[in-house]
Amino acid sequence: MGCSVCAMTEQKRLSPGDKAPAFTLPDSEGKSVSLSDYLGRSVVVYFYPAAGTPGCTKQACDFRDSIGDLATSGYDVVGISPDKPEKLAKFAEAEGLNFPLLSDVDRKVLAEWGAFGEKQNYGRTVMGVIRSTFLVDAEGKVAKAMYNVRATGHVAKLLRELPA
C-alpha cells in the first residue's frame, strides 16, 4: 500500500473560496453550456469517469432522484465526463436523467478542476478521472470541494451537508 498522498502532491486541487474555473462544454445534444450560465444560482458540478458504467450510473441516478431536493435547496446539477456527446445522449435517455451532462473529451476542464490525474485503482496508480463533486456558489466561488467521492451514497451525504 503506497502513499497515495505523496503521489498526489503535484496535482492541482481546488479549495473553498477559490474562483471556480470557467468552462464552456457541449452537452448531450451538442449545445454549449457554460459555468457562467449559472451565475446567480448555486450549482453542483460533478465529474465522473464514464457514462453507462455501474458506479457512474448509480451516481447519476442518485442525482436524478434527488434533483427536487437539490433544487429546493437552490442547487442546479451539472455532470461532466470525458465521454462524447453522443454517448452522453444515450446515457441520459437510458436513465431518464434530468440535468445536463457535459462532454470534456480533451479532459482540459477535468484537469483545471483537479479531477483528472493520478489515482488508485485496484491498488495500482493510474491516470484517470478522479470522481469529484463541487458546490459552486451564486458568485462562482467554490463552496465545497470533494475529491475521490464514492459513487454510492454520495448524493445523500451531500444533501445532509448542504449549507442552509
Image (tube, rainbow, N blue to C red):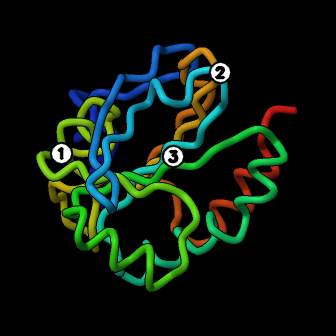
Q: Residues within 10 Å of mark 3 (few under 14, many from 20)?
A: many
User: Marks 3 and 1: in contact by CB < 8 Å?
Assistant: no
Q: Which residue is mark 2?
A: 40
**Taking the image as drawn, is residue 54 in sight?**
yes
Q: Amino acid at mark 2?
A: Gly
**Taking the image as drawn, is residue 6 in sight?**
no
For the residue pair 162 and 91, the one nearer the viewer reads as 91
Instruction: Name the spot of residue 112 as percent of width and height, x first.
Output: 27, 29
Disc on the earlier residue, 2 or 1: 2
Q: Residues within 10 Å of mark 1 (few under 14, many from 20)?
A: some
Q: Quadrant of residue 7?
A: top left
Disc assigned to residue 133: 3
Q: Which residue is mark 1?
A: 107
Disc on the earlier residue, 3 or 2: 2
Q: Amino acid at mark 3?
A: Thr
Q: Amino acid at mark 1?
A: Arg
User: Marks 1 and 2: in contact by CB < 8 Å?
Assistant: no
Q: Residue at x 77, y 40 (%)?
A: 162
Instruction: Name the spot of residue 131 as percent of width and height, x first.
Output: 40, 55
| Image quadrant where one finds the C terminus | top right
